[in-house]
Image: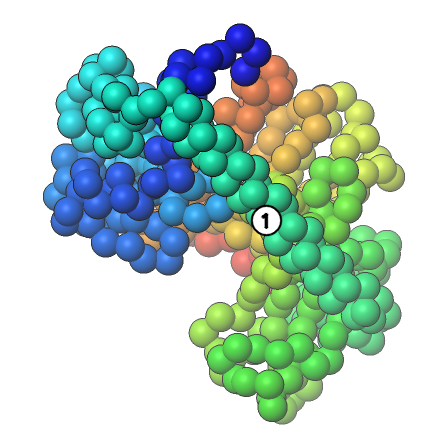
Amino acid sequence: MPGQGAGDVTVRDIALMLKQEAERVCWFLFPNGRVLGGYFQIGSVDGEPGQSLKVTLRGPKRGGWTDFTQPKGSDRGNGDMLDLIQQALGLDKRGAIEEAKRFLHIENMDPNLIARQRERARVAQERAERKAAGKIESRRRHAHQLWRTSSPLVPSSPPVKYLQHRGIDFAHLGKLPGAIRFKPDMIHAELGRDRPQPAMITRMIALDGTTAAAHITYLERRPDGVWTKLRAVESKKKILGPAWDVGAHIPLWKGAQDCTLRDIAPGTEVECSEGIEDGFSFAMANPGARVIAGGTLGLIGRVQLPPQAGQFNILAQRDTEEQAIETLKESIRQQQLRGREDRSNRIVACRWPPPGIKDWNDWLRGEVR
């Protein structure tokens, strides 16, 4: 920073130094916590055992935390390591800064040593960001290679037969989806490399149109010749690639506008399903609609939209599990926040299937019957 003396430690400097010491800070504040899967977990800022407060311990987002016991939108619910010290110890900002200086042993440190520590923290942060960016690019390339080397659909392709079994008629829609391809020998972790399985490989793209990830649905052919999801495994779907990092989506149906999502006309409503089947089911009845899919319920909240997009409609399912209900609420909240950030202030709404019907594919098949 121009004009900054060697010993002039800013709040930003302190936050960056604490970030590199995230796990040590957590153990200092919360001896009842635990580390699991790259996160430090504790019950809340009050320090009781539990897992509702999670602190990221790796990568460029190291030191970021969320306390899920706090109400949505609360200023006590997330922040950086300095914020966590403030919340956990019940201090004001000045008190938290002083405590952080003591923790970092810089309250009486030689100015030149402070400058070196500041520089080490800056270099470590830049290294973490470069490493994370490299991993994202590597995963993106791997996903694109998988999709590119899979077979484009023809009317007899297993994914077409599978979706037809789900009531989706591409003859009615007028074309086969370009985002979906077929791979006859996809490895599934539960079955091992010696039992490759057929799979529907669907391209997930970032807002700029580049491949971000591959959505994999494992398939099997029953003895009666019908194609269904693979029944012998618990996990029937998988996302390969950095879909979460870039807010990717599955481009299912362009509707009345033959253009990328990025280039849709101002005010165009966007329909977003969780899965491929629900999205195409809605398009069957609404062929002029712009339909995308998130791939998972949580990813719907991360989907990046162009600022000119109109109302964002989530093609919701009537889930009864509390986790699914909360994930839907969080996805709505995230999209509302994105609408404020891009100044579109777009409406985020849910489209529900009729009462008594769980999802849009059930609705479609009910009409067919």
Where residue 346 appears, x then y in whole percent? 59, 21
Whether residue 164 can be seen here: no
Where residue 100 appears, x then y in whole percent? 26, 26
Which residue: 16% across, 27% down? 89
Identify the residue position indicated by label 1 in the image: 131
Where residue 105 appears, x then y in whole percent? 26, 30
Whether residue 241 can be seen here: yes
- Towards the viewer: 109 or 32: 109
Is 266 rendered above or below residue 334? above
Which residue: 61% across, 15% down? 343
SS category of the residue bearing label 1:
helix
The image quarter in which residue 87 lies: top left
Is 198 rendered above or below residue 365? below
Task: Tell me if 289 is positioned left or right of 297 in this view.
Answer: right
Which residue: 24% across, 36% down? 69
- Towards the viewer: 143 or 254: 143
The colouring scheme, among rainbow, by chain, secondary structure or one colour, is: rainbow
* Screen quadrant of the N terminus: top right
Task: Tell me if 242 is positioned left or right of 352 in this view.
Answer: right
Is 300 rendered above or below residue 98? below
The image quarter in which residue 81 lies: top left
Task: Tell me if 95 is positioned left or right of 60 in this view.
Answer: left
* Screen quadrant of the C terminus: bottom right
What kind of residue is marked 1? Lys
Which residue: 46% across, 54% down? 358
The image quarter in which residue 162 lies: bottom right
Where residue 327 appears, x then y in whole percent? 41, 44
Is 181 rendered above or below residue 196? above
